[in-house]
Amino acid sequence: MTQNKFHYLGNVFGLLIICAILVLSFIDQLIGHDFPCPLCLLQRTAFVGIGLCLCMNIKNGIKTSNYGLMLLTSVLGFSVALRQVFLHVAPGDPGFGPPLLGLHLYNWSAIVFMFIVGLVGIGLCMNNAFQPKVEKTRKLVTGLMILFLLLILGNGVSTFLECGVMICPANPVQYDLLSFSELQSIGAELSS
């Protein structure tokens, strides 16, 4: 297997993992009624940024600039996840949200971001793949990229419904824009 093919398949697999992370986040949010906090939303944004870099590598060919941007986004996501870990590290603190396999989602995010940093570092060491050769995108991969774009749209809509145009609440418990009392207060402000 050539290094270029290895990079291409690695980027496709990485995009599949990012889509799985975003889908699981939505399942937890919509079915488990576990609304994402502002730090959780920032971590999702970092995953979206990583996914966009993967899409650029898949669609336009493997480039070091895409990996560099992916590395910076991963470090940013790790920093946000680590901040959330440190907020809940005190003894007796139950953490934010229910744990998954013994760890909270922000702990898993920190682990995944560090794993991505390592994989990007390995990818950058394989410099024979950085050539202008572009793989023909298969229908399944195109479908995966469309799913990813729909997940971005879904995250945007979900965040808007949760926060509106205001600052997101620290411990969200509902979609503010879908709350009847919130709509009444907005209507009262507009009528006065």
Image: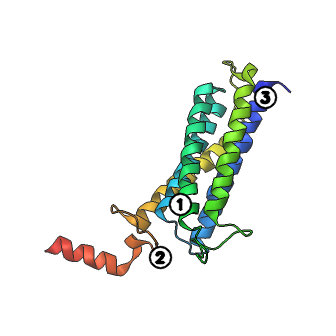
Position of residue 62 in the picture relative to residue 33 (left or right): right
Q: Earlier in the sequence, mark 2 or mark 1?
A: 1
Could you tell me which quadrant the C terminus lies in?
bottom left
SS for callout 3 = helix
Identify whether 137 is placed above or below 73.
above
Q: Nearer the viewer, residue 141 or 13?
A: 13
Position of residue 101 in the picture relative to residue 152 (left or right): right
Identify whether 4 is placed above or below 168.
above
Residue farthest right in this picture: 1
Cα distance, mark 3 to mark 1? 34 Å
Instruction: Please name the residue that numbered disc 2 is placed on.
Output: 173
Residue 40's disc number: 1
Disc 2 crowd, CA 10 A, few/some/many (<14, 14-19, 20+) = few
- What x and y, as percent, mark residue 46? 55, 48
Q: Earlier in the sequence, mark 3 or mark 2?
A: 3
SS for callout 1 = helix
Residue 5's disc number: 3
Q: Of discs 3 and 1, which sits in the foreground?
A: 1
- What x and y, as percent, mark residue 35? 52, 70
Cα distance, mark 2 to mark 1? 14 Å
SS for callout 2 = loop
Q: Nearer the viewer, residue 66 or 144?
A: 66
| Contact (Cβ within 8 Å) of mark 3 with mark 1 | no
Residue farthest front in this picture: 91
Residue kind at label 2, given as amino acid type: Val
Residue farthest left in this picture: 192
Q: Residue at x 56, y 75 (%)?
A: 33
Q: Earlier in the sequence, mark 3 or mark 1?
A: 3
Q: Is residue 139 visible?
A: no
